[in-house]
Amino acid sequence: MTSSLEALLPGTERALLHRIAVGQSEGRAPSLVGAVARGGRVVWTGSCGDVGSAVDTQYRVGSITKTFTAVLVMRLRDEGLLGLDDPLEMHLPGTGVGEATIAQLLGHTGGLAAESPGPWWERTPGSLRPELADVLGERPLAHPRGRRHHYSNTGYTLLGSLVAAVRGVSWEEALSAEVLEPLGLSRTTARPVAPHADGWAVHPWADVLLPEPVEDLGLMAPAGQLWSTAADLCRFANFLAEGDERVLSAESVREMRTHAVPPAAGDWDSGYGLGMQLMRQDGRTLVGHSGSLPGFVAGMWLSVDDDVAAVVLANATSGPQSAVLASDLVRIVAQAEPRMPAPWRPLPAADPSLLALTGPWYWGTYAYALRVIEDGGVELQPLRGAGRGSRFRARPDGTWVGLDAYYDGEVLRVVRREDGTVSHLDLGSFVFTREPYEPGDAVPGGVDDAGWRGAR
């Protein structure tokens, strides 16, 4: 395939610009910028209202900060400095809520209250909350831990303090050295750096403005402090899709994009992973985060399957639906210019023993097919209708481990007879044979010796 796919088609660009123009007008935002990335690079930017650069103007991104904080925590896990199932008390003692695990805090299931009990923390200086006890208050828990998803800004305050305690430097220093600098996010900062938008409140019943205060959030900074640009957030979204060994592996960011707990009842199209919001829309899975602080709203969504990321930033306290707009930008590009499939190429080598395992297998009377994929892996998929299919990664001991769906984490192994020939496949105790219920096969419960028969 030799054609260039870097630029979007004019019709797609106009649809994107129209969408953000409608969003800015209906949302009554002083300014609004949007950007789309594909193939790891920004392929479109647009702006409406009073803004100099759609690419380089900083906006405050609110809770998108949480995803950056989660990346720092996952780095500590990958370095072996903590475990996700560790109680917070092991690494940050004395909080009073230390029984919550790190994974529960990342996924907002630690039972903590949503907000700090003091004055509205987003519009007041962090100096009013100098200690964690001031952030948590006298009743820090709203629910039993581990029982339900309950979004918590105080939980991410604890995670930021955890990073500082384990690293021995501030959350801001760790973020700059470990994430922002390696990824080249030079326009993502804890305090605004020109050019940046000013935050405004728009009167709900008149077209007039009121400036919003810009406060340093102090200990609560890991929950919502950051300023960033559309271009930087597109680069960050690409990292969340592919990983970067200098920061986090592809496997670790994939773990972040996986549901931490089942969605709440009545909310089956959305959920939360480890520092990332998850959503199903128009038949596709979106991952990312929304954000808001007084004067600003932000949205960042990524469709890994479509290889499309979108960012929308605006400087109004309310009105623009930035997260909805960002998801619409993803949809517009994914539908108008669907992702080209990777060109088929033969595997570099053929393993005769592995090739001998390919083809049909039967779990009872359910027909499956096994095929070889890259790096010595295999794929087992039903031949008809929906079923329990999965890809498997090869392990050094000659077995394979499931990578997705029902068999995620389950072990697939070849069971051989005494003469070395293959008897069956064992997948988490399920037996797959070459024929359906062949007499003499190792089928649990046995097979009737009379074999198959017609109706009488």
Image (spheres, rainbow, N blue to C red):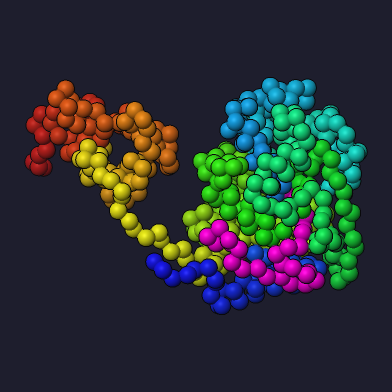
**Residue drawn 74% across and 68% down?**
53
Asked if residue 169 is positioned above or below residue 306 in the image, the reply reads above
**Residue 217, position as x, y percentages in the image:** 84, 43
Magenta segment: 36-63
2 vs 215: above or below? below
Q: What residue lies at 79% left-to-right and 42% top-to-bottom? A: 221
Left or right: 126, with 409 as reference point = right
Relative to residue 195, is residue 270 depicted above or below? above
Q: Is residue 422 left or right of residue 4?
A: left
Q: Is residue 292 visible?
A: no
Determine the residue positioned at 33% across, 31% down: 399
Residue ID at (68%, 21%): 90
Q: Decide whether residue 455 is among the magenta residues.
A: no
Measured from the top left, where is residue 329 in percent x and y?
Answer: 60, 65
In-front residue for pair 208/414: 414
Q: Quadrant of the N terminus?
A: bottom left
